[in-house]
Amino acid sequence: MDATDGTPQERSAGSRGRQGFFSLKLRPWHVLGLFVVLACLATLAGFLGRWWWRFENFGAFKVQGAVFLALAAAAFWLAKRRNSAIVAAVFALVNAAAFVPLYFGGNSPAGPAQFRVMLINVHTANTDYEAVRTAVRRERPDALVALEVNQRWVAELDHLRDEWPFRKQMPRPDNFGIVLYSRTQPVAAHILHLGEAEVPTVLARYDVAGKRLTLIGTHPVPPVNLEYVAWRNEQMALLAELIRATPGAVVLVGDLNMTADSPVFRDFCSASGLRDSRQGFGVQATWPAHLPPLLIPIDHCLVSREVLVRSRRVGKYVGSDHFPVIADFSVKE
Protein backbone atom coordinates (compact mmCIF):
# COMPACT_ATOMS: atom_id res chain seq x y z
CA MET A 1 0.00 0.00 0.00
CA ASP A 2 1.27 3.50 -0.80
CA ALA A 3 2.43 5.59 2.16
CA THR A 4 -0.04 8.28 1.21
CA ASP A 5 -3.04 5.95 1.53
CA GLY A 6 -5.48 6.33 4.44
CA THR A 7 -7.59 9.15 5.80
CA PRO A 8 -6.05 12.51 6.78
CA GLN A 9 -6.72 11.73 10.44
CA GLU A 10 -4.91 8.39 10.18
CA ARG A 11 -1.96 9.95 8.41
CA SER A 12 -1.76 12.72 11.05
CA ALA A 13 -1.92 10.22 13.91
CA GLY A 14 0.82 8.13 12.30
CA SER A 15 3.02 11.19 11.89
CA ARG A 16 2.61 12.15 15.57
CA GLY A 17 3.40 8.60 16.62
CA ARG A 18 6.59 8.57 14.59
CA GLN A 19 7.64 11.98 16.01
CA GLY A 20 7.03 10.80 19.55
CA PHE A 21 9.04 7.63 18.96
CA PHE A 22 12.05 9.22 17.30
CA SER A 23 12.29 12.63 19.01
CA LEU A 24 13.66 13.36 22.47
CA LYS A 25 12.56 16.58 24.10
CA LEU A 26 15.35 18.07 26.19
CA ARG A 27 14.29 20.98 28.37
CA PRO A 28 16.91 23.69 29.06
CA TRP A 29 17.22 22.66 32.72
CA HIS A 30 17.93 19.09 31.67
CA VAL A 31 20.70 20.26 29.34
CA LEU A 32 22.23 22.47 32.03
CA GLY A 33 21.97 19.64 34.53
CA LEU A 34 23.77 17.31 32.13
CA PHE A 35 26.65 19.75 31.74
CA VAL A 36 26.82 20.24 35.49
CA VAL A 37 27.09 16.49 36.00
CA LEU A 38 29.89 16.34 33.43
CA ALA A 39 31.69 19.26 35.11
CA CYS A 40 31.38 17.55 38.50
CA LEU A 41 32.76 14.30 37.11
CA ALA A 42 35.63 16.20 35.47
CA THR A 43 36.38 17.84 38.83
CA LEU A 44 36.57 14.44 40.51
CA ALA A 45 38.68 13.02 37.67
CA GLY A 46 41.18 15.84 38.19
CA PHE A 47 42.07 14.36 41.56
CA LEU A 48 42.92 10.98 40.02
CA GLY A 49 45.84 12.03 37.83
CA ARG A 50 48.27 10.00 39.90
CA TRP A 51 46.42 6.81 38.94
CA TRP A 52 45.87 7.52 35.23
CA TRP A 53 47.77 10.11 33.25
CA ARG A 54 44.76 11.17 31.16
CA PHE A 55 42.94 12.32 34.30
CA GLU A 56 45.72 14.85 34.90
CA ASN A 57 44.33 17.05 32.10
CA PHE A 58 40.97 17.35 33.85
CA GLY A 59 42.65 19.04 36.81
CA ALA A 60 44.07 21.80 34.63
CA PHE A 61 40.78 23.67 34.12
CA LYS A 62 39.94 24.59 37.70
CA VAL A 63 39.16 28.23 36.90
CA GLN A 64 36.82 27.33 34.05
CA GLY A 65 35.13 24.69 36.18
CA ALA A 66 34.62 27.09 39.08
CA VAL A 67 33.15 29.84 36.89
CA PHE A 68 30.78 27.53 35.02
CA LEU A 69 29.56 25.74 38.13
CA ALA A 70 29.08 29.00 40.03
CA LEU A 71 26.95 30.41 37.20
CA ALA A 72 24.99 27.16 37.01
CA ALA A 73 24.43 27.25 40.77
CA ALA A 74 23.07 30.79 40.52
CA ALA A 75 20.76 29.81 37.66
CA PHE A 76 19.43 26.79 39.53
CA TRP A 77 18.90 28.85 42.69
CA LEU A 78 16.92 31.51 40.85
CA ALA A 79 14.82 28.74 39.30
CA LYS A 80 14.19 27.36 42.81
CA ARG A 81 16.01 24.12 42.00
CA ARG A 82 17.75 24.15 45.35
CA ASN A 83 19.32 20.69 45.38
CA SER A 84 20.89 21.19 41.96
CA ALA A 85 22.11 24.63 43.02
CA ILE A 86 23.78 23.24 46.15
CA VAL A 87 25.57 20.48 44.24
CA ALA A 88 26.86 22.93 41.63
CA ALA A 89 27.94 25.40 44.32
CA VAL A 90 29.84 22.75 46.29
CA PHE A 91 31.80 21.65 43.23
CA ALA A 92 32.42 25.28 42.27
CA LEU A 93 34.02 25.78 45.68
CA VAL A 94 36.09 22.61 45.26
CA ASN A 95 37.51 24.02 42.03
CA ALA A 96 37.99 27.50 43.48
CA ALA A 97 39.91 26.13 46.46
CA ALA A 98 42.75 25.22 44.08
CA PHE A 99 43.45 28.78 42.87
CA VAL A 100 41.83 31.38 45.15
CA PRO A 101 44.68 31.04 47.72
CA LEU A 102 47.12 32.22 45.01
CA TYR A 103 45.69 35.72 45.39
CA PHE A 104 46.74 35.92 49.04
CA GLY A 105 49.90 35.51 51.04
CA GLY A 106 53.33 35.50 49.57
CA ASN A 107 56.17 36.28 51.92
CA SER A 108 58.12 38.88 49.93
CA PRO A 109 58.27 42.30 51.59
CA ALA A 110 58.41 45.42 49.47
CA GLY A 111 61.86 46.25 48.23
CA PRO A 112 64.00 46.69 45.15
CA ALA A 113 64.40 43.81 42.72
CA GLN A 114 67.91 42.67 41.90
CA PHE A 115 67.16 40.48 38.89
CA ARG A 116 64.44 40.21 36.26
CA VAL A 117 63.86 37.07 34.22
CA MET A 118 61.56 36.78 31.21
CA LEU A 119 60.26 33.53 29.76
CA ILE A 120 58.79 33.40 26.26
CA ASN A 121 57.66 30.30 24.42
CA VAL A 122 57.88 31.96 21.02
CA HIS A 123 56.12 29.06 19.21
CA THR A 124 58.21 27.70 16.36
CA ALA A 125 55.62 28.51 13.66
CA ASN A 126 55.11 32.09 14.89
CA THR A 127 56.55 34.66 12.47
CA ASP A 128 55.80 37.82 14.45
CA TYR A 129 59.46 38.30 15.31
CA GLU A 130 59.14 42.03 15.86
CA ALA A 131 56.42 41.54 18.50
CA VAL A 132 58.76 39.32 20.52
CA ARG A 133 61.70 41.71 20.16
CA THR A 134 59.51 44.66 21.15
CA ALA A 135 58.25 42.80 24.22
CA VAL A 136 61.79 42.00 25.33
CA ARG A 137 62.97 45.58 24.87
CA ARG A 138 59.92 46.87 26.73
CA GLU A 139 60.44 44.55 29.72
CA ARG A 140 64.26 44.83 29.73
CA PRO A 141 64.97 41.56 31.58
CA ASP A 142 68.40 40.70 32.94
CA ALA A 143 67.94 37.25 31.41
CA LEU A 144 65.62 36.02 28.68
CA VAL A 145 64.78 32.32 28.23
CA ALA A 146 63.14 31.66 24.85
CA LEU A 147 61.60 28.27 24.02
CA GLU A 148 60.67 26.56 20.71
CA VAL A 149 63.57 28.32 19.00
CA ASN A 150 64.76 27.12 15.59
CA GLN A 151 67.53 28.55 13.43
CA ARG A 152 65.22 31.20 11.98
CA TRP A 153 64.27 32.38 15.44
CA VAL A 154 67.93 32.53 16.49
CA ALA A 155 68.64 34.80 13.53
CA GLU A 156 65.69 37.04 14.39
CA LEU A 157 66.50 37.19 18.11
CA ASP A 158 70.10 38.12 17.35
CA HIS A 159 68.83 41.66 16.84
CA LEU A 160 68.73 41.80 20.64
CA ARG A 161 72.43 41.20 21.09
CA ASP A 162 73.21 44.90 21.34
CA GLU A 163 71.63 44.90 24.83
CA TRP A 164 71.78 41.18 25.64
CA PRO A 165 75.21 40.22 24.32
CA PHE A 166 75.59 36.84 26.02
CA ARG A 167 73.87 33.90 24.38
CA LYS A 168 73.69 30.19 25.21
CA GLN A 169 71.61 28.28 22.72
CA MET A 170 70.51 25.01 21.22
CA PRO A 171 68.07 25.63 18.37
CA ARG A 172 66.11 22.67 16.98
CA PRO A 173 63.74 22.19 14.04
CA ASP A 174 61.07 20.76 16.35
CA ASN A 175 59.39 22.57 19.26
CA PHE A 176 62.16 22.04 21.80
CA GLY A 177 64.93 24.46 20.89
CA ILE A 178 66.06 26.80 23.66
CA VAL A 179 68.14 29.96 24.00
CA LEU A 180 69.29 32.10 26.91
CA TYR A 181 70.08 35.79 26.35
CA SER A 182 71.72 37.64 29.19
CA ARG A 183 72.50 41.30 29.83
CA THR A 184 75.59 40.32 31.83
CA GLN A 185 78.04 37.47 31.48
CA PRO A 186 77.08 34.53 33.71
CA VAL A 187 79.74 32.94 35.87
CA ALA A 188 79.02 29.70 33.96
CA ALA A 189 76.42 28.45 31.47
CA HIS A 190 75.64 24.97 30.15
CA ILE A 191 73.18 23.11 27.97
CA LEU A 192 72.02 19.87 29.60
CA HIS A 193 70.09 16.88 28.28
CA LEU A 194 68.18 15.20 31.07
CA GLY A 195 66.48 11.89 30.51
CA GLU A 196 65.52 9.79 27.55
CA ALA A 197 63.67 12.59 25.75
CA GLU A 198 67.03 14.41 25.38
CA VAL A 199 65.43 17.83 25.03
CA PRO A 200 67.77 20.67 26.02
CA THR A 201 67.75 22.49 29.35
CA VAL A 202 69.82 25.64 29.86
CA LEU A 203 71.55 26.33 33.17
CA ALA A 204 73.39 29.55 34.02
CA ARG A 205 74.99 30.68 37.25
CA TYR A 206 75.09 34.37 38.17
CA ASP A 207 76.58 36.54 40.86
CA VAL A 208 73.73 38.77 42.08
CA ALA A 209 74.84 41.40 44.58
CA GLY A 210 77.54 39.04 45.80
CA LYS A 211 75.18 36.07 46.12
CA ARG A 212 74.98 32.97 43.97
CA LEU A 213 71.93 32.51 41.73
CA THR A 214 71.36 29.57 39.38
CA LEU A 215 68.84 30.13 36.58
CA ILE A 216 67.39 27.06 34.84
CA GLY A 217 65.25 27.12 31.69
CA THR A 218 63.53 23.95 30.54
CA HIS A 219 60.74 22.59 28.32
CA PRO A 220 59.74 18.95 28.85
CA VAL A 221 57.63 17.16 26.26
CA PRO A 222 53.82 17.38 26.53
CA PRO A 223 51.79 14.50 28.03
CA VAL A 224 50.18 13.38 24.77
CA ASN A 225 50.84 9.65 25.17
CA LEU A 226 52.22 7.26 27.75
CA GLU A 227 55.78 7.42 26.41
CA TYR A 228 55.86 11.21 26.49
CA VAL A 229 54.40 11.20 30.00
CA ALA A 230 57.22 8.92 31.14
CA TRP A 231 59.82 11.15 29.46
CA ARG A 232 58.38 14.32 30.99
CA ASN A 233 58.20 12.80 34.45
CA GLU A 234 61.75 11.46 34.20
CA GLN A 235 63.06 14.89 33.19
CA MET A 236 61.29 16.54 36.11
CA ALA A 237 62.66 13.96 38.55
CA LEU A 238 66.21 14.49 37.26
CA LEU A 239 65.77 18.26 37.48
CA ALA A 240 64.72 17.89 41.11
CA GLU A 241 67.90 15.89 41.85
CA LEU A 242 70.00 18.54 40.09
CA ILE A 243 68.38 21.38 42.04
CA ARG A 244 68.83 19.62 45.39
CA ALA A 245 72.54 19.36 44.63
CA THR A 246 72.82 23.03 43.58
CA PRO A 247 74.00 25.42 46.32
CA GLY A 248 72.53 28.88 46.70
CA ALA A 249 69.42 30.44 45.19
CA VAL A 250 67.68 28.74 42.28
CA VAL A 251 65.10 30.05 39.81
CA LEU A 252 63.52 27.67 37.30
CA VAL A 253 61.46 28.91 34.37
CA GLY A 254 59.84 26.88 31.65
CA ASP A 255 56.83 25.63 29.80
CA LEU A 256 56.43 22.54 31.95
CA ASN A 257 53.41 21.21 30.04
CA MET A 258 51.48 20.82 33.30
CA THR A 259 49.64 23.02 35.76
CA ALA A 260 50.19 23.25 39.48
CA ASP A 261 47.30 20.81 39.95
CA SER A 262 49.33 18.00 38.40
CA PRO A 263 50.64 15.43 40.90
CA VAL A 264 53.91 15.51 38.95
CA PHE A 265 54.20 19.25 39.62
CA ARG A 266 53.52 18.77 43.32
CA ASP A 267 56.04 15.94 43.53
CA PHE A 268 58.63 18.07 41.76
CA CYS A 269 58.18 21.01 44.13
CA SER A 270 58.41 18.70 47.13
CA ALA A 271 61.53 16.94 45.82
CA SER A 272 63.33 20.07 44.59
CA GLY A 273 62.39 22.44 47.40
CA LEU A 274 61.13 25.06 44.92
CA ARG A 275 57.89 26.98 45.34
CA ASP A 276 55.47 28.59 42.92
CA SER A 277 56.26 32.29 42.35
CA ARG A 278 52.56 32.98 41.70
CA GLN A 279 51.75 32.98 45.43
CA GLY A 280 50.20 36.36 46.16
CA PHE A 281 49.97 37.25 42.46
CA GLY A 282 47.10 35.08 41.21
CA VAL A 283 46.50 32.43 38.55
CA GLN A 284 48.36 34.08 35.64
CA ALA A 285 47.33 31.67 32.90
CA THR A 286 49.46 31.65 29.74
CA TRP A 287 48.23 29.04 27.23
CA PRO A 288 46.51 28.82 24.73
CA ALA A 289 46.79 32.54 23.98
CA HIS A 290 44.47 32.23 20.97
CA LEU A 291 41.61 30.80 23.08
CA PRO A 292 41.24 33.01 26.18
CA PRO A 293 38.31 31.05 27.69
CA LEU A 294 40.55 27.96 27.88
CA LEU A 295 43.67 29.65 29.28
CA ILE A 296 45.61 27.58 31.81
CA PRO A 297 48.93 28.26 33.60
CA ILE A 298 51.56 25.91 32.16
CA ASP A 299 54.42 28.45 31.90
CA HIS A 300 56.07 28.56 35.30
CA CYS A 301 58.59 30.38 37.40
CA LEU A 302 59.61 28.42 40.50
CA VAL A 303 62.02 29.69 43.14
CA SER A 304 64.01 28.34 46.07
CA ARG A 305 63.65 29.57 49.65
CA GLU A 306 66.60 31.97 49.17
CA VAL A 307 64.62 33.98 46.59
CA LEU A 308 62.24 36.85 47.38
CA VAL A 309 59.70 37.39 44.60
CA ARG A 310 59.07 41.11 44.19
CA SER A 311 56.61 40.89 41.28
CA ARG A 312 55.31 38.32 38.87
CA ARG A 313 53.06 38.89 35.86
CA VAL A 314 52.02 37.75 32.42
CA GLY A 315 53.18 39.82 29.46
CA LYS A 316 51.33 41.02 26.39
CA TYR A 317 50.46 38.90 23.37
CA VAL A 318 53.45 38.34 21.04
CA GLY A 319 51.91 36.22 18.28
CA SER A 320 52.70 32.94 20.04
CA ASP A 321 50.22 30.49 21.53
CA HIS A 322 51.85 31.34 24.89
CA PHE A 323 51.92 34.61 26.81
CA PRO A 324 55.30 35.62 28.26
CA VAL A 325 56.04 35.49 31.98
CA ILE A 326 58.06 38.21 33.74
CA ALA A 327 59.33 37.89 37.30
CA ASP A 328 61.36 40.28 39.46
CA PHE A 329 63.17 38.97 42.51
CA SER A 330 66.08 39.42 44.82
CA VAL A 331 68.27 37.00 46.74
CA LYS A 332 68.10 36.93 50.52
CA GLU A 333 71.04 38.19 52.54
Image: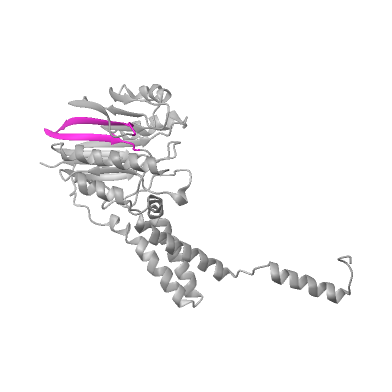
Q: Look at the picture and state if 44 lies above or below 87.
A: above
Q: Quadrant of the N terminus?
A: bottom right
Percent across and percent down for residue 81 are 49, 76
**Which residue corresponds to the image point at 43% horizontal and 56% vertical from the top-left?**
64
**Which residue corresponds to the image point at 29% horizontal and 40% vertical from the top-left?**
234
Please say whether residue 256 is visible from this viewpoint: no
Taking depth in this image into account, of 148 and 12 the one nearest to the observer is: 12
Percent across and percent down for residue 188 are 19, 26
Seen as rendered, the residue at the extreme front is 1
Taking depth in this image into account, of 229 and 333 the one nearest to the observer is: 229
Please say whether residue 97 is visible from this viewpoint: yes
Q: Look at the picture and state if 300 lies above or below 122.
A: below
143 sits left or right of 172 in the view:
left
Percent across and percent down for residue 239 are 24, 38
**Which residue corresponds to the image point at 73% horizontal and 69% vertical from the top-left?**
19
Which residues are the magenta region?
Answer: 197-220
Percent across and percent down for residue 8 are 87, 74
In the rendered image, residue 217 lying in the magenta stretch gets the answer: yes
113 sits left or right of 324 in the view:
left
